[in-house]
Image (cartoon, rainbow, N blue to C red):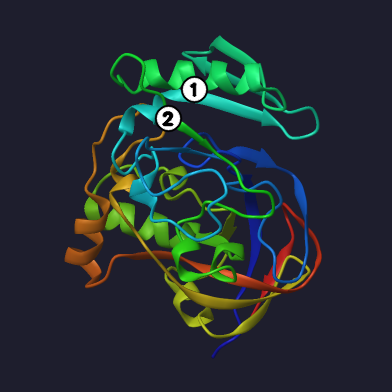
Amino acid sequence: MSTATGRVEALHVYPVKGLSPQPLREVELSAGRAFPHDRAFALARPGGEYAPGVRRGIAKRQFFVLVAEARLAGLRTHLDTATGTFTVAVREHEVLRADLRTGEGVRAVLELFARVLDLPPGVHPVWAHEEGRRFTDTAPGGDAAMELVSVLNLASVREFAARVGARVDPLRFRANVHLDGLPAWGEQDLVGAEFDLGGVRVRGAFPTVRCAATEVDPGTGRRDLPVPQLLAREYGHEHMGLYVEVLAGGTLAVGGAVRA
C-alpha cells in the first residue's frame, strides 16, 4: 500500500442516535473505545425489541432514526454532557430545554418527540440508555463493533458529488471523523491496515455500507438524493467511509496529520 497523507478536517459526536451532530475541536480516545458520549442515547420504538436493561445490539430500525423519519433532520439538538442539559431548536428557536438526569426532563423530551413523530395519543418513544453501551449501527455486530469510530474521506464525497452532479453535504454520512488530503477512495486501501489518525493509532475495520438515512439533506430534512442507489450505480458498491478500531489512546484534534 502506498503512503497516504492527509489531515483531520472535522470531528463530530452524536450523543442521541438519529439527532444532530455536535462539532468538537478535539477528543480523548481510549484503546478499543469509540468517541465518548457517541450514540449513548436513542429514541426506541414502543413495543419494539428495546426495553430498559437490554444488553445486546439492536438493529437501527428498532429506533426512530433518519432512515425512516427524515423530519428529525429539521431539528437542532445539543446535549451538554457535563450538566445533562438537552436542548432542541426548530429554525433557530429553542423549543425545549430539559435535564436528562431527571425523570421530569426525560418525560419532557419524550413528549416533544411524540408530537414531532406524530405518534398516537398516549404513545411515546422509549428513552434508551444503558450505561457503558452505545446504539450504533454496528452494535448488532457485538460489543467490539459498537466501539468503532466512523471515518469519512471528504475527497470521496467530492468525487461522488461531481459524478452525480449534485451538492452532497458530508454531514449526510454522520461520521465521527472527516479527513481531507487523501486521494478520492483512498480510504478503501486502509481497510485492514494500521495507520496514524492525528496521533492516535487505529486499524481500518471495514467499509461503511450506506443506508437510506443518507438520502436526507441534513440542512432541510428533505429526502432528496438516493445516495445508496447512486453509489451502487456509479461504483458497484454502497460504501462511503470506513470504521476504524482505536489501538492506542490519545488526543485526536482537528488539524492532526493522517499517515498510512
Q: Which residue of the protein is positioned furthest toward the bottom in this rendering?
A: 1
Q: Position of residue 184 (x, y in %)?
A: 43, 68
Circle on res. 110: 1
Lateral position of residue 168 relative to residue 134, left or right: left
Q: Position of residue 202 (x, y in %)?
A: 67, 75
Instruction: Please tell me which residue is depicted at 74% across the width and 60% down the height of the picture.
Output: 256
Q: Quadrant of residue 221?
A: top left
Q: Which amino acid type is shown beneath numbered disc 1?
A: Leu
Q: Which amino acid type is shown beneath numbered disc 2?
A: Pro
Q: Secondary structure at mark 1?
A: helix
The one of 256 and 11 positioned closer to us in this rendering = 11
Instruction: Please tell me which residue is depicted at 47% across the width and 43% down the height of the picture.
Output: 171
Crowding near the residue tagged with mark 2, few <14, some 14–19, many ≥20 C-alpha atoms within 10 Å: many
Q: Position of residue 100 (x, y in %)?
A: 67, 26
Instruction: Please tell me which residue is depicted at 31% across the width and 13% down the height of the picture.
Output: 121
Lateral position of residue 128 relative to residue 59, left or right: right
Q: Quadrant of residue 257?
A: bottom right
Q: Earlier in the sequence, mark 1 or mark 2?
A: 1
Compared to residue 66, the image places residue 184 above or below, namely below
Estimate the spatial distance between the alpha carbons at disc 1 and disc 2, rounded to whole Å.
6 Å
Name the quadrant of the C terminus: bottom right
Q: Position of residue 62 (x, y in %)?
A: 36, 46
Lateral position of residue 243 relative to residue 100, left or right: left
Q: Find out whether the residues at labels 1 and 2 contact each other: C-beta distance under 8 Å.
A: yes
Instruction: Please tell me which residue is depicted at 49% across the width and 57% down the height of the picture.
Output: 154
Compared to residue 56, the image places residue 71 above or below, namely above
Q: Which residue is mark 2?
A: 125
Name the quadrant of the N terminus: bottom right
Q: Secondary structure at mark 2?
A: loop
Circle on res. 135: none
Crowding near the residue tagged with mark 1, few <14, some 14–19, many ≥20 C-alpha atoms within 10 Å: some
